[in-house]
Amino acid sequence: MAFSALMGGQAYAQQKLTFALVPKNMNNPFFDQARDGCKKAEAESKGAFQCMYIGPGAHGGGEEQVQIVQTIKPKGGTICIQSGGAAAANHNERMKGIRDTLAGKSSAQSPGDRLTGQNGWKEIDGCPLYTNDDFPVSVQQFQDIMAKNPNLDAFTPTGGFPQFVPDANRAAVAPFKDKIAKKELALVVADTLPVQIDQMKEGLSLGQVGQRPFEMGYKTMFALKDVKGGKAPPADPTYTGLDVCTSKNLDTCIAK
């Protein structure tokens, strides 16, 4: 989970509780979904608690993603992984998942061992790419790497970075729609927000694998309320599930 949930004191009259949801950064559509879930929980609490959504600014499931890549590219090929910050633990874990699954063996630690031919997969020079959560930069990185490597077999962002600036991403990916449709380029992106699914429906990605940030924000608030009330804490970690979207299940892949 890429945000923290904190219990606050009784800040308001009638002993209203304040719970803070603290994302890694606030200028991010993924965390906006968590905020919306948090606010829904607040509304349903009927005044029992409030959700305070606060965090730093804009720059503050790898295995499932790879399964899609392997189904269209069973013999391996060249790949470029695009990540967030080099020190971002959650993205390093996703990179490890991608590398380990393709290699067929476990690395000692994240971000995993570089692919140098294991199971036919090799990371190209200049990759992985680090966006530092700068969405326009992520689009430019894709354009630059494809210009230098037009026959790249797979491009796998560990977050939805380029798709969060949809107009720019459409312009960047449009020249490769035919290669994506023919499964010559496995462009498989993390996250399944509505703005991303819209782009997948346009043929701008081959697959999407997403967590459920709305559920994270929603369930976290009630979990904190239970803990504050003396109940046992929830399981650590607590999973809210994944949505795996391909061309075969695009209309039904998102959990309702």
Image: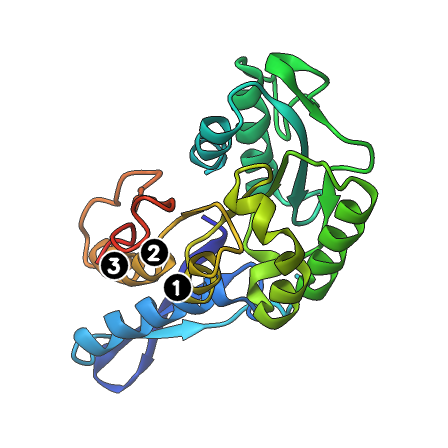
Q: Quadrant of the C terminus?
A: bottom left
Residue nearest the observer in this picture, 181 or 152: 181
Q: Amino acid at mark 3?
A: Lys
Q: Is residue 84 above or below residue 73?
A: below
Residue nearest the observer in this picture, 227 or 191: 191
The residue located at (69%, 62%) in the rendering is 134
Q: Secondary structure at mark 2?
A: helix
Which residue is identified by label 1? 34
Q: Is residue 58 above or below residue 84?
A: below
The answer to whether residue 69 is left or right of residue 152 is left
Marked residue nearer the N-terminal end (1 or 2): 1
Q: Secondary structure at mark 1?
A: helix
The answer to whether the residue labelled 1 contacts the one labelled 2, judged by CB atoms less than 8 Å apart, is yes
Which residue is identified by label 3? 228
Which residue is identified by label 2? 216
Q: Amino acid at mark 2?
A: Met
The residue located at (54%, 36%) in the rendering is 94
User: Within 10 Å of the Cα at label 1, are there few (<14), some (14-19), or many (20+) other Cα atoms?
Assistant: many
How far separated are the C-alphas under marks 2 and 3? 18 Å
User: Within 10 Å of the Cα at label 2, are there few (<14), some (14-19), or many (20+) other Cα atoms?
Assistant: many
Q: Position of residue 35 (x, y in %)?
A: 40, 69
Query: Viewer-nearest of labels 2 and 3?
Result: 2
Q: Position of residue 181 (x, y in %)?
A: 51, 46
